[in-house]
């Protein structure tokens, strides 16, 4: 399994963008979950974008964390979007309960 890196940036419109790179497995599960929850609950941007353009696969724990972040964002009025998943990830996100309107660019 390749190692994964999580990059965080803020776009000019104030959106927070989280960009994982590589296969996202159990080795970063806690870090990704904490980053998602912290961003939604404490930073509270208008939008949180999880950009999966450079992610070939997400393990089930991280897939669930991304899906849960969408629900948490709804509760706290933070729009959470998942951008650029590959076809397989888009299907897995839908199966995990991520609404289709939250998945962009697949």
Image (spheres, helix red, strand yellow):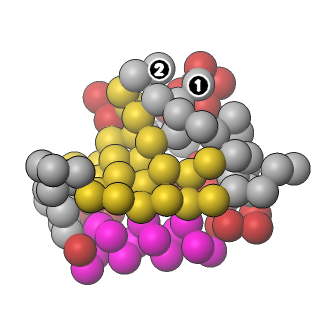
Q: Is residue 105 left or right of residue 10?
A: right
Q: What is the secondary structure assignment of the residue under circle 2?
A: loop
Q: Position of residue 69 (x, y in %)?
A: 40, 58
Q: Residue at x 68, y 67 (%)?
A: 28
Determine whether, in the image, residue 61 is placed left or right of residue 51: right
Residue at the spot 26% in from the left edge and 79% down from the top edge: 42
Secondary element under disc 1, as helix, strand or loop, is: loop
Name the residue that disc number 1 marks.
86
Q: Give, as a single range, the part of the protein colored magenta.
A: 30-42
Kindly check if marks 1 and 2 are in contact, taking CB atoms under 8 A apart as contact: yes
Counting from the top left corner in percent of width and height, residue 52 is at: 52, 39
Q: Per the image, is 35 magenta?
A: yes
Q: Is residue 48 visible?
A: yes
In this rendered view, identify the residue nearer to me: 63 or 8: 8
Would you say residue 46 sits in the magenta stretch?
no
| Percent coordinates x, y for residue 31 in the rendering | 58, 73
Measured along the vertical axis of the image, is residue 99 above or below residue 49?
above
Identify the mark nearer the N-term, 1 or 2.
Answer: 1
Asked if 6 appears above or below 44 in the picture, the reply is above
Mark yes or no: residue 95 visible. Answer: no
Predominant SS along the magenta part: helix
Q: Nearer the viewer, residue 53 or 86?
A: 53
Q: Position of residue 70 (x, y in %)?
A: 35, 52
- Which of the labelled discs sits on residue 106, or is there none? 2
């Amino acid at each position: 399994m390749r190692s994964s890196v999580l990059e965080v940036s803020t776009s000019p419109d104030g959106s927070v963008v989280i960009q994982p790179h590589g296969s996202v497995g159990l080795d970063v599960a806690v870090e990704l979950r904490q980053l998602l929850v912290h961003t939604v609950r404490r930073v509270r941007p208008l939008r949180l974008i999880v950009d999966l353009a450079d992610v070939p696969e997400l393990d089930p724990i991280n897939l669930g964390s991304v899906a849960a972040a969408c629900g948490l964002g709804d509760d706290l009025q933070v729009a959470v979007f998942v951008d650029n998943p590959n076809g397989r990830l888009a299907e897995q996100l839908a199966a995990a309960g991520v609404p289709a309107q939250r998945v962009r660019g697949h």
